[in-house]
């Protein structure tokens, strides 16, 4: 029984590591514009401290009017919806990204960002 429990826990850990790896790999699409470092804005705003923040309020970045007026507080649900189709959630946002259609990659990316942006 103990061996079965240990094997199950190892499988869960491996699955979690696989999702984390997929999330990090999917984030490679984002690094041309976004950083995870505090205060490091580029073409896009830093993602440091993203979850729990209000859209359009990162210091030192010039956001579009629609993003500033959106009132979105970034949580995993809103972030998932935005990354699936940015223009659907915030029409006329300046983010030139069509979205992520692969649901596994999307889920992994949001999970990765939940930890990497802290």
Image (spheres, rainbow, N blue to C red):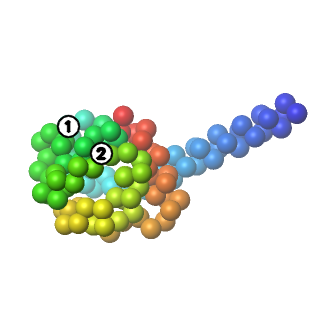
Q: Which residue is located at x 34 percent, y 41 percent?
A: 51
Front position in the image: 102 or 92: 92
Q: Which residue is located at x 23 percent, y 49 percent?
A: 71
Tag 2's secondary structure? loop
Q: Can residue 69 be seen in this snapshot?
A: yes
Spot occupied by residue 82 in the image (x, y as percentages of width and height): 34, 58
The residue that label 2 is drawn on is 73
Q: Which residue is located at x 58 percent, y 43 percent?
A: 17
Front position in the image: 6 or 93: 93
Spot occupied by residue 37 in the image (x, y as percentages of width and height): 28, 38
Number of other residues with Cα within 10 Å of mark 1, as a class: few under 14, some 14 to 19, many 20 or more: some
Sequence-earlier tag: 1 or 2 = 1
Number of other residues with Cα within 10 Å of mark 2, as a class: few under 14, some 14 to 19, many 20 or more: some
Q: Which residue is located at x 32 percent, y 46 percent?
A: 74
Q: Can residue 36 be seen in this snapshot?
A: no
Spot occupied by residue 104 in the image (x, y as percentages of width and height): 53, 59
Q: As displayed, is residue 47 above or below residue 100?
A: above
Tag 1's secondary structure? loop
The residue that label 1 is drawn on is 39
Question: Position of 112 compared to 71: left or right?
Answer: right
Q: As displayed, is residue 6 above or below residue 55?
A: above
Front position in the image: 25 or 93: 93
Dividing the image into 4 quarters, which one contains the C terminus? Answer: top left
Dividing the image into 4 quarters, which one contains the N terminus? Answer: top right
Image-quadrant location for residue 84: bottom left
Mark seen at residue 51: none
Spot occupied by residue 39 in the image (x, y as percentages of width and height): 20, 37
Residue contact between numbered discs 1 and 2, judged by CB atoms under 8 Å: no
Question: Looking at this rendering, what residue extends furthest in the right direction?
Answer: 1
Question: Position of 3 compared to 42: left or right?
Answer: right
Question: Position of 23 compared to 64: left or right?
Answer: right
């Amino acid at each position: 029984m103990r061996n079965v429990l240990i094997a199950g826990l190892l499988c869960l850990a491996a699955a979690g590591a696989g999702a984390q790896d997929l999330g990090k790999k999917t984030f490679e699409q984002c690094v041309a514009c976004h950083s995870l470092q505090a205060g490091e804005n580029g073409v896009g705003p830093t993602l440091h401290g993203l979850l729990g923040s209000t859209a359009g309020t990162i210091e030192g970045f010039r956001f579009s009017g629609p993003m500033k007026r959106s009132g979105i507080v970034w949580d995993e649900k809103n972030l998932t919806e935005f990354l699936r189709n940015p223009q659907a959630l915030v029409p006329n946002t300046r983010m030139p990204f069509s979205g992520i259609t692969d649901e596994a990659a999307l889920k992994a990316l949001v999970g990765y960002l939940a930890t990497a942006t802290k």
